[in-house]
Image: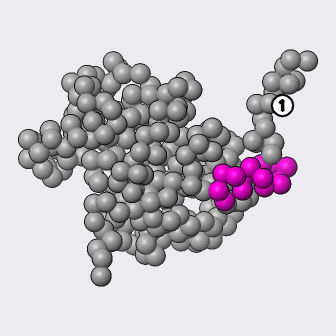
Amino acid sequence: MNDTTNHHSGVSLQVHGLRKSFNGEEVLRGIDFEVQPGEIFVIMGPSGSGKSVLLKHLIGLEPPDEGEILINGESIQLPEIAAKYRMALVFQSGALLNSLTVGENVGLYLSEHRLKPPAEITRIVTEKLEAVGLKDTVDKMPNELSGGMKKRVAIARALVIEPQLILYDEPTSELDPLSAVVIGREILTLKQRIHVTSLVVSHDRDLAFGIADRIAVISEGRILTVGTPEAVKRFNDPTLQKFLNADFQHESQSSL
């Protein structure tokens, strides 16, 4: 029997019947989807559709009112199961500590928990920064980096735990188009190199259609459709088409 928790294997993720209300208002209304091991799965939708609340459930910050979240078929509501798998989150802001160098930020988890000797931490930090093309930034401070570089440092920090599942929260927000493309490439490269399962929450349509194996479109707390990028583009739903064509409508109106 193969060990499914080795360093280079993605995990499967199943979400069944997830419901969540705040002050009597239902924000998640029965969310269902499955992510295959090693897949890049993008959850896409407009602001206020329930994407951030869903992400909080996936990382265990919010308990669902109903439904369950499973990794490799095991419920992550059980602490011992959640602890068994290595999940990493790349925050929307990058969430780097400004008082620490890039290298210290990337190695923080290992050094704080004294998981490795200093020399080994230095080696791991160098390796992970090299993986995202930022080996030369190890001694820089976060305020010396561009927005795109900060996001890549945040990805390097996530890689330190050898994750089996990486969750990305709006990884291209506040980035210029070129930096956004670099981040998209980074996510693709990691899939090819370490076969990690990637779940990307984003409203960036270019990113979603550029990197996803499959896309789930969320609207008003429900999944409208799940499919390949091609299938999602063809899905005939007024809400989805409005979201996909928003810029063109805006441009044509503004040019009148």
Q: Is residue 230 left or right of residue 66?
A: right
Q: Is 236 contained in the magenta span?
A: yes
Image quadrant containing the C terminus: top right
Quarter of the figure with residue 151: top left
Residue farthest to the bottom, as pictured: 1
What color scheme is it? Answer: one colour
Which residue corresponds to the image point at 28% horizontal and 36% vertical from the top-left?
129
| Kind of residue indicated by mark 1 | Gln
Number of callouts in the render? Answer: 1
Whether 157 is drawn above or below 71: the answer is above
For this rendering, which residue is in front, 182 or 225?
182
Please tell me how crowded label 1 is: few (under 14), some (14-19), or many (20+) other residues with Cα within 10 Å: few
Instruction: Name the residue beneath numbered marker 1.
Output: 249
Q: Please, what is the dominant secondary structure of the magenta stretch?
A: helix
Quarter of the figure with residue 132: top left
For this rendering, which residue is in front, 37 or 106?
37
Q: Position of residue 102 (x, y in %)?
A: 27, 30
Which residue corresponds to the image point at 55% horizontal and 46% vertical from the top-left?
211
For this rendering, which residue is in front, 35 or 85?
35
The magenta segment is 227-240
State the SS at label 1. helix
